[in-house]
Image (cartoon, rainbow, N blue to C red):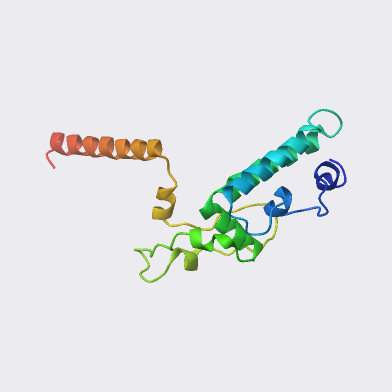
Amino acid sequence: MSKNPYATLLGLDSDSPNYYELLGLPLGCDDGDAIEVAVRRQTAELAKFRTGPKADDCQRLLEEVLRARMILIDPLERGLYDDTLGGSSNSDKDMPKPITSTWHPGVTTSQTSVPLKTKSLAYVPHGDDFLTRLERLSWKSILFLCTCIVCATSIICVWMITHRV
């Protein structure tokens, strides 16, 4: 890896830019179209270096640009990422209201999550409760979970009938 691949491949001043800097966006940008245009611009710039001596740096930065897109395009993920930067974002209006936990009445998920103290590109989501994670599942995953529950219930019923419980 070269000394500063961000400078040599993308012309960035920072040697560890956040996702907004990596894409050339203003901090807290919540415009999906602007994010997509920035990703296309940066991937086109990196495409020039896919072969040759800078190919390894190019591949790593390309993966980083795509990871930045995944985080910044989703309002929930972007809000959590913005929290790791320590700044406020324009996406606060897009963030869902915290769900009150049924196990700890009056305590919200934002109060129970562990705050991150790093300002690096390594993104670690905050601790979520079950309902918040369930909202992120695809319909296929939910269908699979429901099928498993029905099968398990059927097995238990058959066992109870055969053992006269």
Q: Nearer the viewer, residue 133 or 164?
A: 133
Position of residue 102 in the picture relative to residue 80 (left or right): left
Q: Quadrant of residue 83?
A: bottom right
Residue 71, position as x, y percentages in the image: 59, 49
Position of residue 154 in the picture relative to residue 54 (left or right): left
In the depicted structure, whether residue 93 falls above or below residue 32: below
Residue 68, position as x, y percentages in the image: 65, 47
Residue 15, position as x, y percentages in the image: 81, 52
Q: Nearer the viewer, residue 39 or 122?
A: 39
Q: Nearer the viewer, residue 41 or 112?
A: 41
Residue at the extreme bottom: 106
Tally the numbered discs: 0
Residue depicted at x 74% and y 36%: 44
Residue depicted at x 78% and y 30%: 50
Q: Quadrant of residue 57?
A: top right
Residue depicted at x 38% and y 71%: 106
In the depicted structure, whether residue 2 falls above or below residue 120: above
Check the picture and name the quadrant holding the N terminus: top right
